[in-house]
Image (spheres, helix red, strand yellow):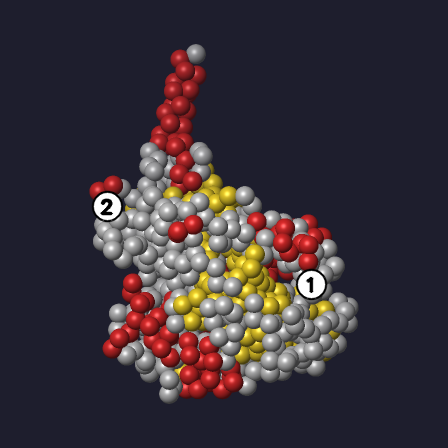
């Protein structure tokens, strides 16, 4: 009896001692992922005296130094963390390298207030490693084609295809007009860029740099107009991707459909060194809805600068292309260069007046990833003045249906006498207005905005001096800009004065609301800059802090732009431009106010409310059901129910409250939403 009792005591003490001395463990499941975006579950146990500063580091490649993680999460993201065990599930993007995970203990006394992330939060410390996981691999999928995106080519019967793979071995795109008859084949050419070609940190640092893989490019030729083409990427040796499809361009088409926005960025499933853009997921979601609703009607996307917001952290480009692939593999995805793709201290064109404008917003990338990961129509290039390759995709133009589109660069020389200026001048003067009665110019930094962007005042003045005369003389219909992370629509305007028609006074739109969540305030009253009061100037017809995108649809007679808000996927503002020059405002109360003295004066703009337009043209403002379910029915099915009932009012010249922004909560009223005050 005494012996049995003694044995029990010994066993108890043995178990207790074993538990007390147990080391933390970390495991992953599954160990092999089949494709980019698959989930992995990371589980830990036996974490002694858990702290809310304990954290999980995400590493790729797996042998990266402790402080060279690509992302992290705190263990308190798991509901059971206080018990010393838990799990976190994350989708992983194929970075053409394995992943591994580590958990660390970080203490309050070790917080380094000088080692901060983009939001000025201390980055976690790596002094106390608790456990490491085994590797997670993509297996044979590491060499599959990923990040697929399309673009127009100079010839309308062609389509460009770009993708990324893990090695430079030969790849092909096979294509045809039936899934089971991909009888055509195009060889893809692989290129890459290296760390030494980056211009500054973090892009050329060991923390920011990751191998970008091989970037492949090819052109699909001899496409029949306006038909669905199926395509598949790979090789017999490396395997083939799933089958994708797109609608080919029709050079004789009169209809145009585009989705236009700027400054979208991407989301990451983890915290990292820089702020990422969660709202970008909603933008992609709603655009995908619209593309699918169009069925066999062609469309394309135009992303006007500030593309991924990688800013020197290479893997963010991979996250971006993985995020847009569901839409960019279906329709052409066009881009303009922005400050966050390009700007660097030694950039070759930096006049004295731009010294404080062109900084280091590109994070040392100096346009290299942007130039090699995209292939736009045209052949514009600029020297970088460094080891970096030529900067590409700067300015180019193309026709789509009844619209001529011109994309320009606001980050390189646009002044009179320069190469870009001459290109813009020749291009606008050569537009065939019988074929394309409407002309749209796109660039990143806005020529007009009522936001409080003081730093860009000089560049706006230069754009007004050098570029606006070209837009006015050549009767540009619409000028679309990004950079300011809001949506704003102006009256037909030139020389800061509202005009009667868009002919001679282009309508300007700011569409930088694609996803980046930093928003500047609107400009304050010049006679009271000390007070947080933000009157809406007369030339600003509609403005909002709502995230979203715009839809552009046109035929020979009319071009319509609608702003779709991300919070509900509904239309919140609409403007129509007729080929005859008239501008029809789609916001019912643009010129009505409870105080007529503060309302914008009418500028030959007739009401475009639903009640007005339905009587003369029932296709102008169909319901959302019409757009989604009856996309074959009419080319006017771009408007979602209630689009014409958006209310804009400027109340007493100002809105009390520190943060402002107009948000259309329903077709009957406006809401003001708070915005952040941080650096762009």
Q: Earlier in the sequence, mark 2 or mark 1?
A: 2
Q: Nearer the viewer, residue 639 or 179?
A: 639
Tag nearer the camera, 2 or 1: 1
Label 2 CA crowd tier, 10 Å (few <14, some 14–19, many 20+): few
Coordinates of residue 680 in the picture (x, y in percent): 34, 59
Q: Nearer the viewer, residue 340 or 601?
A: 601
Point out the residue furthest to the top here: 1
Q: Is residue 569 left or right of 115 when viewed as pictured? A: right
The image quadrant that residue 245 belongs to is bottom right
Q: Which residue is mark 2?
A: 110
Asked if labels 1 and 2 touch by Cβ distance under 8 angstroms, the answer is no
Coordinates of residue 634 in the picture (x, y in percent): 72, 61
Q: Is residue 581 left or right of 534 when viewed as pictured? A: right
Label 1 CA crowd tier, 10 Å (few <14, some 14–19, many 20+): some
* In the depicted structure, whether residue 142 falls above or below residue 678: below
Residue at the image position 35 percent from the left and 35 percent from the top: 50
Q: Nearer the viewer, residue 186 or 161?
A: 161
Residue at the image position 57 percent from the left and 49 percent from the top: 645
Q: Which residue is mark 1?
A: 635
Q: Nearer the viewer, residue 622 or 389?
A: 622
Local secondary structure at mark 2: helix
Local secondary structure at mark 1: loop
Q: Is residue 228 left or right of 381 when viewed as pictured? A: right
Residue 617 visible in this rendered orientation of the protein: yes
């Amino acid at each position: 009896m005494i012996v049995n009792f003694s044995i029990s005591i010994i066993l108890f003490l043995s178990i207790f001692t074993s538990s007390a001395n147990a080391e933390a463990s970390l495991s992953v499941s599954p160990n092999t992922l089949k494709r980019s975006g698959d989930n992995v579950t990371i589980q830990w146990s036996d974490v002694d005296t858990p702290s809310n500063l304990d954290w999980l580091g995400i590493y790729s490649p797996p042998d990266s130094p402790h402080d060279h993680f690509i992302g992290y999460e705190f263990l308190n993201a798991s509901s059971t963390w206080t018990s010393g065990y838990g799990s976190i599930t994350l989708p992983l993007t194929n970075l053409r390298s394995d992943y591994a995970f580590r958990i660390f203990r970080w203490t309050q006394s070790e917080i380094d207030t000088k080692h901060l992330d983009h939001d000025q939060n201390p980055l976690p410390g790596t002094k106390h490693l608790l456990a490491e996981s085994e590797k997670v691999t993509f297996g044979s999928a590491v060499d599959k084609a990923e990040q697929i995106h399309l673009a127009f080519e100079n010839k309308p019967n062609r389509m460009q295809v770009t993708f990324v793979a893990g090695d430079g071995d030969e790849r092909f795109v096979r294509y045809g007009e039936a899934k089971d008859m991909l009888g055509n084949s195009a060889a893809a050419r692989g290129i890459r860029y290296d760390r030494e070609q980056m211009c500054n940190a973090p892009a050329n640092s060991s923390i920011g740099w990751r191998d970008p893989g091989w970037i492949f490019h090819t052109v699909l030729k001899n496409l029949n107009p306006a038909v669905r083409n199926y395509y598949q990427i790979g090789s017999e040796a490396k395997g083939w991707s799933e089958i994708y499809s797109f609608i080919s361009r029709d050079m004789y088409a009169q209809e145009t459909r585009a989705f236009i926005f700027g400054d979208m960025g991407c989301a990451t499933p983890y915290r990292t060194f820089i702020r990422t853009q969660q709202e970008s997921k909603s933008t992609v979601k709603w655009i995908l809805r619209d593309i699918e609703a169009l069925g066999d009607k062609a469309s394309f996307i135009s992303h006007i600068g500030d593309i991924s917001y990688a800013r020197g952290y290479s893997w963010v480009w991979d996250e971006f292309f993985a995020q847009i692939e569901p839409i960019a593999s279906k329709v052409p995805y066009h881009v303009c260069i922005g400050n966050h793709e390009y700007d660097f201290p030694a950039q070759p064109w930096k006049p004295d007046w731009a010294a404080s404008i062109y900084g280091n917003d590109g994070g040392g990338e100096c346009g290299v990833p942007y130039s090699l990961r995209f292939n736009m129509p045209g052949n514009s290039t600029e020297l970088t003045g460094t080891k970096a390759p030529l900067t590409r995709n700067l300015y180019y133009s193309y026709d789509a249906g009844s619209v001529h589109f011109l994309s320009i660069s606001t980050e390189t020389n646009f002044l009179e006498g320069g190469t870009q200026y001459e290109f813009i001048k020749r291009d606008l003067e050569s537009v065939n207005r019988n074929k394309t009665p409407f002309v749209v110019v796109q660039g990143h930094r806005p020529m007009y905005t009522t936001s409080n962007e003081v730093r860009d005042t000089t560049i706006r003045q230069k754009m007004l001096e050098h570029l606006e005369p070209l837009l006015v003389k050549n009767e540009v219909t619409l000028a679309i800009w990004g950079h300011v992370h809001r949506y704003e629509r102006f009256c037909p305007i030139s020389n800061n004065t509202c005009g009667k028609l868009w002919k001679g006074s282009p309508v300007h739109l700011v569409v930088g609301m694609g996803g980046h969540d930093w928003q500047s305030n609107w400009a304050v009253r010049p006679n009271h800059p000390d007070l947080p009061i933000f009157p809406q100037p007369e030339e600003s017809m509609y403005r909002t802090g709502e995230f979203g995108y715009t839809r552009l649809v046109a035929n020979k007679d009319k071009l319509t732009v609608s702003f779709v808000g991300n919070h509900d996927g509904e239309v919140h503002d609409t403007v129509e431009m007729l080929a005859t020059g008239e501008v029809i405002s789609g916001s019912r109360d643009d010129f009505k106010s409870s105080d007529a003295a503060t309302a914008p004066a009418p500028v030959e703009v007739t009401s475009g409310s639903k009640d007005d337009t339905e009587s003369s043209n029932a296709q102008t403002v169909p319901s959302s059901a019409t757009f989604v379910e009856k996309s074959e029915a009419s080319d006017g099915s771009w408007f979602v129910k209630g689009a014409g009932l958006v209310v804009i009012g400027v109340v007493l010249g100002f809105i009390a409250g520190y943060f402002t922004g107009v948000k259309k909560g329903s077709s009957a009223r406006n809401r003001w939403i708070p915005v952040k005050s941080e650096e762009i």
